[in-house]
Image (cartoon, grey):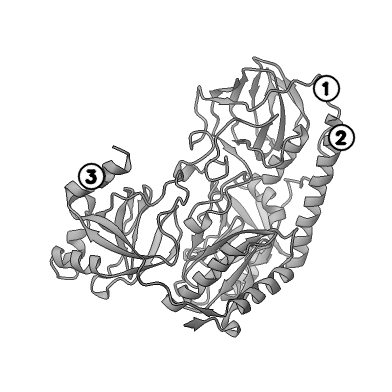
Amino acid sequence: MGIRVIKPGLLSSIQDLGRYGYQKSGMAVSGAMDGLALQIGNLLLGNAKETAGLECTLLGPVLVFEKDQLIALTGGDLSAQIDGLAVPMWKPLYVHRGAVLSFGKAVKGCRTYLCVYGGFNLPEVLSSASTYLKAGIGGWKGRALKRDDLIPFKRLYTKSLKKFNWSSVPGIYPDLQSNRIRVLEGPEFKSFTRKSRSDFFEQSFSLSTQADRMGHYLDGPLLYRDQNGELLSAAVSFGTVQVPPQGKPIVLMADHQTTGGYPRIAQVITADLTCMAQMQAGHQIRFEGIGLAQAQELLVKRKQQLEELQKAITLKYG
Amino acid sequence: MISINPSLVQYYPLGDSAIVIQFGEGVNPLINTQIRAVTAWLDEYTFEGFVEYVPAFTTITVYYEPWILDYKELLSLMKEMIADIGEIQEPDESGIIEIPVLYGAEQGPDLQYVADFHQISTAELISVHSQAVYLVYMIGFVPGFPYLGGLDERIATPRKDVPRSVVPAGSVGIAGQQTGVYPIETPGGWQIIGRTPLNLFDPDRAAPALLKAGDRVRFKAIDQTTFIEIKGAKHGH
């Protein structure tokens, strides 16, 4: 009992909120590129927010349900359909056995999360169900989905409640059309030339076609340092903007390497990683500075919003 | 005994969910000793909001949950920790991990090149490489990849001009003043002089990485038969 893959789509992989505690062993964190969407999807179903879901990228998969199940679709809008009819996102959907979930045009964003009631029945590797594609670890057999895979459910939804009048509250999820990405200065910010520092904030960048779960290359003004000394490798994280010597910045994403030796000009704040993760190639962005305390307040606020959503939904399921 | 001088330690944020603690500049075993002392402390006394730490050559980066404690609170906690650590025992010289290596042939396609580069024989190169004791400064790049310091300058060799698209798991390489072992198959530009039958990264082990920052390592030359034996034993035959 589970979902069977008819077409795998461009890149569909199982992700939770990441594999923590092993970066000191060189192990990437991985996890959902848009962790906020995954959490909301789980909360809508009454799941623990960190439950693993399916991350579908740009060209979504075609999946058939082998049992009745309760699901939620969140994140980017890839025109989800069930049996050829458009279905709403951001709310629980009761899906019958034999139903076919497919996707169409990427209307907004590029990653949709499919959460299922109770989650998928997959073994955890190093305390996480996330797929780390490069090392072939975790998720479904350490890889992206392929045709004929059967991803098992952990539980079936058996409650009589099958019509749902609730959805995610507005205000938690950001506007994906936004061009603003807020950043903190990186440890090597001051080693960049005056012109590069001003270009970084005054000019626009756009997402290049070289963008995957490891990193997003940006097109725009090239950035240079005052002196080109080699740096000793140190930690980099999800959102680190590093600049190799040729000058083209890379925003590191969920599957980023644990350490790097390129200068770190900036760090995208955690609250704006959803927008960064949902961007399609060509999307224009402007970097805007923000204070550390303010960036942390945004995370405290988000945490509260998610807790409120969880409380409200727990009451509804009864 | 050595101790951490708190006035020489720098702290700065890496984004909104990590702090970097820097202990000095350059590749230096004394800095590594300080970093080990701090990571040992973090292993023992965790705190609410702590996520994980990543040691590197001169830094430890500590990831935390800002909704539990903010940067200022974490900063004072970290300063307190550094002050509390006080004097540090010198690292124990006795714990050297031996890594068997089959040098040359198809396992070490660059052995001859590196020997020629330094105008020495391959036997001399193997002897120099396998005599030294190396310090694991950090693990990074890919799961379980050790950055080893202490390579004899006589065999330090620049990276390849064009990286290989495939370097097999277990390959032992040289890049400048560093030597290291590729735990998984990956593209790579290091000069490959041999291969170990040991598995440096196995997610099914309790400690998935064979090595950790602060470990001491020595390479031991082995022959083809021993290589196959160790590799076979590993698979439980």
Residue at (51%, 25%) from the top-left corner? A149
Do the numbered discs 2 and 3 sit on residues whose CB atoms are within 8 Å? no
Question: For the view shown, which residue lies furthest in the top direction?
Answer: A98
Q: For this rendering, which residue is in front, B202 or A71?
A: B202
Residue that badge 3 annotates: B229
Separation (CA) of disc 2 from disc 3: 61 Å
The reply, left or right, for residue A93 in relation to residue B128 is right
Point out the image quarter for the C terminus of chain B: top left
Assess disc 3: are there few (<14), some (14-19) or many (≥20) residues with their C-alpha within 10 Å of its C-alpha: few
Q: Secondary structure at mark 3?
A: helix
Q: Is residue A207 above or below residue A225?
A: above
Q: Which mark is residue A247?
A: none
Let me know if residue B28 appears in the view: no
Residue B228 relative to residue A271: left or right: left
Contact between labelled residues 2 and 1, with CB atoms less than 8 Å apart: no
Compute the Cα span from label 1 to label 2: 15 Å
Q: What residue is pinned by disc 1?
A: A163
**Residue matched to label 2:** A315
